[in-house]
Amino acid sequence: MSKVAIVGGGPAGLSAALFTAKNGLDAVVFDTDETWMHKAHLFNYLGVRSIAGDEFMNVARGQVEDRGADLRVGEEVTSVETDGDGFTVSSDDGEYDADYVVFGTGTDTELLESLGVETNDNDTIDVDLSMETSVENAYATGAMIRDQEWQAVISAGDGGAAALDILSKEKGEHFHDFDTPDDVPSLRDEA
């Protein structure tokens, strides 16, 4: 069973996948490769001086795969349903069970609406500070929760917040993903 199903492979979805996979949860990302990042050039992403959106996506996808996430580029999710114990995520390629689902689908809220999540007066998805929706263990991130406030760095933070909440639930206490230089393997170890 995939613990975390992530629908959307932009900065929010990939950030959620990075944090969850890096910390031992099974994470699968469904990525239609339609992210707005393909039209972007980043000059305003903290820690990045200048990078084309396509290049950023290649680096981010590689980082997520390196940490153990299952990245399914080109596989579109057709439905997400609650099944009592979690969620069933369906695509044209099959069905997947998940304990948690994170949505990072830009302004497309159709899958979330089919779950019956609550919305705000401005037609955005209502979430708490951890990005959790009114449906337990379903998270919404990025443009679908922010009225016209669309930035890659904000979306990545939303994905990270959702992931930390999931990790905290799994570990039974507040979880912080904070690495020190001693935690980082040397390049020699990775070769």
Image: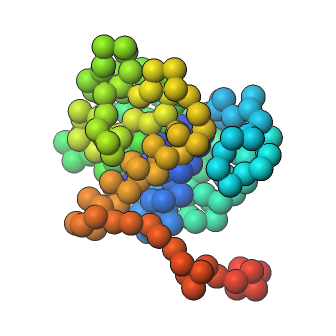
Q: Is residue 71 above or below residue 148?
A: below
Q: Is residue 7 above or below residue 22?
A: above
Q: Position of residue 86 (x, y in %)?
A: 27, 45
Looking at the figure, which quarter contains the N terminus?
A: bottom left
Residue at image coords 43%, 46%: 5
Numbered disc total = 0
Looking at the figure, which quarter contains the C terminus?
A: bottom right
- The way the protein has been coloured in the rendering is rainbow
Q: Is residue 119 above or below residue 52?
A: above
Drawn side of residue 187 relative to residue 170, left or right: right
Drawn side of residue 60 relative to residue 170, left or right: right
Drawn side of residue 72 relative to residue 126, left or right: right
Q: Position of residue 48 (x, y in %)?
A: 72, 51
In the picture, residue 53 is in which quadrant? top right
Q: Position of residue 57 (x, y in %)?
A: 71, 45
Residue at image coords 44%, 67%: 177
> Foreground residue, 179 or 24?
179
Q: Is residue 1 visible?
A: no
> Foreground residue, 134 or 97?
134
Residue at image coords 64%, 32%: 35
Q: Is residue 149 visible?
A: yes
Residue at image coords 51%, 74%: 179
Drawn side of residue 136 relative to residue 35, left or right: left
Q: Is residue 22 above or below residue 57?
A: below
